[in-house]
């Protein structure tokens, strides 16, 4: 998010764009925009939207204990019903309300999620021991010291070395180039306000260890031995239901429902926007463009509602999300980086990198002949290697067959580009704080096998 505020956002707002593919069109041409838009749309409709619906439905089922509340004992049927309820409700105001509705609901839900998340951590610590929060923290650390280690060993789902390859690239794309996330910044009235918003959001993100990680450790402590059959995807809902006072369970269920709808709406709004502005004819007139986006958004929502319940068989929904994200994160990020920092790379190189990158990663994931190689190297290192290969290929292409005239960025004049004077101090302060926090909880002995 610091990189977005300091490096990417000024370039986006200077171009006066509404979507990421639109920026790539300014740099490379309409073909690049079309390819990128299609990749985004397919990925959102088949990967992101279904995962949001699935995780939201499982969370609500656990928090509200819907089997007991509804009398429906069949988990599969209940999952389908919850997914479709969330999907239909979210579709209505995402498709007809537009980005402003999404932004307002995000703000309200974000506040509720922050308060509710802190309350769950507090009450969860109370459930661990009788001596208060700090005593409970000591008890958790003594019982599970490995859970507090920020360094992932070789057996971890996120080994330490991957922080410098695929994991770094996936998160860099997510926070700087992912249409669903950064589309709010495109609506900033000026660069100063956009940077403020991103960096304030970054400050809230620092609370993630307290709101997300610590409740996970508490749930593991409370349920891992007593309920070995409890799925990891259901642990948070169970924790909320068990530790929150009854009068707060409904409040937090409403907050979670709002957060799920907010995430779903953002992704669905992005999908509709990408189609209407990136694939549908832009000469059709505003009314027809909006109507086309609404119709396509409705179709994407239905597809997501059909696919979401099918994710129930995944061993780790987070691992599945990270792996699938690599399919489109890596090629688009490679092209974006070259587009921003090289004025010689031709459009043909960018288009070839988008298609080839997507195809190579898909082969590594889904074709058994190559899947073994990916498994041996590691998914994240594989993604890092593909990224490096794409960037190198485009760089060489730009040297061998450069564009006839080096590309120059021309300000659109739509937005005041005066930066926030505290952007760099705030950004660097956040980065240093996070690195120090990471270092405090780092135990490198796991890398030596101690």
Image (cartoon, rainbow, N blue to C red):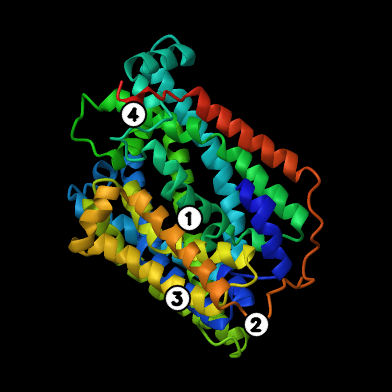
Label 1 residue SS:
helix
- Residue 165 shown left or right of residue 80 in the figure: right
Q: Position of residue 352 (x, y in %)?
A: 45, 75
For the point 37% across and 32% down, which residue is it? Answer: 216
User: Which numbered mark, 3 or 4, is in the foreground of this view?
Assistant: 3
Residue under label 3, please give it: 352
Q: Earlier in the sequence, mark 4 or mark 1?
A: 4
Residue under label 2, please give it: 404
The vertical placement of 269 against 106, above or below, is: below
The residue lying toward the viewer, choosing from 79 and 150, is 150
Residue count near mark 4 (Cα–Cα under 10 Å), binned few <14, some 14–19, many ≥20: some
Residue count near mark 3 (Cα–Cα under 10 Å), binned few <14, some 14–19, many ≥20: some
The residue lying toward the viewer, choosing from 397 and 140, is 397
**Could you tell me if the residues under marks 2 and 4 are in contact, i.e. CB atoms within 8 Å?**
no
Residue under label 4, please give it: 219
- Label 2, label 3: how far apart the Cα atoms are: 19 Å
Q: Earlier in the sequence, mark 3 or mark 1?
A: 1
**Could you tell me if the residues under marks 4 and 1 are in contact, i.e. CB atoms within 8 Å?**
no
User: Which numbered mark, 2 or 3, is in the foreground of this view?
Assistant: 2
The residue lying toward the viewer, choosing from 41 and 417, is 417
Q: Quadrant of residue 297?
A: bottom left
Q: Earlier in the sequence, mark 1 or mark 2?
A: 1
Q: Quadrant of residue 389?
A: bottom left
Q: Is residue 269 visible?
A: no
- Label 3, label 1: how far apart the Cα atoms are: 32 Å
Q: Is residue 274 visible?
A: yes
For the point 68% across and 49% down, which residue is it? Answer: 197
User: Seen from this angle, which residue lies furthest top?
Assistant: 131
Residue under label 1, please give it: 263
For the point 18% across and 62% down, which residue is it? Answer: 369
């Amino acid at each position: 998010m610091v990189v977005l505020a300091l490096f990417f956002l000024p370039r986006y707002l200077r171009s006066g764009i509404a979507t990421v593919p639109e920026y790539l069109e300014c740099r490379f041409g309409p073909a690049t925009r079309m390819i990128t838009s299609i990749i985004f749309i397919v990925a959102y409709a088949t990967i992101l939207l279904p995962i949001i619906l699935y995780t939201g439905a499982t969370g609500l089922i656990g928090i509200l204990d819907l089997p007991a509340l509804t009398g429906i004992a069949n988990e599969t049927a209940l999952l389908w019903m919850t997914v479709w309820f969330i999907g239909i409700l979210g579709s209505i105001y995402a498709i007809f309300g537009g980005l402003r509705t999404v932004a307002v609901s995000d703000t309200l839900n974000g506040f509720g999620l922050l308060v509710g998340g802190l309350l769950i951590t507090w009450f969860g610590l109370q459930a661990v021991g009788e001596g208060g929060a700090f005593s409970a923290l000591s008890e958790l650390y003594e019982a599970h010291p490995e859970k507090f280690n920020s360094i992932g060993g070789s057996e971890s789902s996120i080994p330490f070395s991957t922080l410098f390859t695929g994991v770094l690239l996936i998160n860099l794309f997510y926070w700087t180039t992912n249409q669903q996330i950064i589309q709010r910044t495109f609506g900033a009235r000026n660069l100063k306000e956009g940077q403020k918003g991103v960096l304030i959001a970054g400050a809230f993100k620092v609370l993630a260890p307290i709101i997300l990680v610590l409740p996970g450790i508490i749930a593991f402590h409370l349920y891992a031995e007593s309920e070995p059959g409890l799925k990891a995807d259901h642990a948070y809902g169970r924790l909320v239901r068990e530790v929150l006072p009854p009068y707060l369970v409904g409040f937090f269920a409403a907050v979670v429902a709002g957060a799920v709808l907010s995430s779903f709406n953002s992704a669905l709004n992005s999908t509709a926007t990408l189609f209407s502005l990136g694939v549908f004819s832009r000469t059709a007139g505003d009314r027809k463009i909006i109507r086309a986006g609404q119709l396509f958004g409705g179709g994407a929502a239905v597809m997501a509602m059909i696919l979401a319940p099918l994710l129930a068989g995944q061993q780790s929904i987070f691992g599945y999300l990270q792996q699938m994200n690599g399919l489109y994160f890596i090629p688009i990020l490679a092209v974006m980086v070259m587009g921003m920092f090289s004025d010689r790379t031709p459009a043909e190189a960018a288009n070839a990198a988008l298609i080839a990158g997507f195809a190579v990663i898909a082969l590594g994931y889904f074709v058994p002949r190559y899947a073994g190689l990916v498994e041996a190297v590691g998914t994240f290192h594989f993604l890092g290697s593909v990224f490096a290969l794409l960037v190198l290929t485009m760089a060489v292409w730009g040297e061998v067959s450069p564009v006839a005239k080096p590309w120059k960025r021309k300000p659109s004049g739509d937005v005041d580009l005066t930066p926030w004077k505290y952007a760099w101090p705030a950004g660097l302060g956040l980065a240093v704080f996070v690195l120090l926090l990471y270092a405090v909880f780092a135990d490198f002995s796991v890398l030596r096998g101690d």
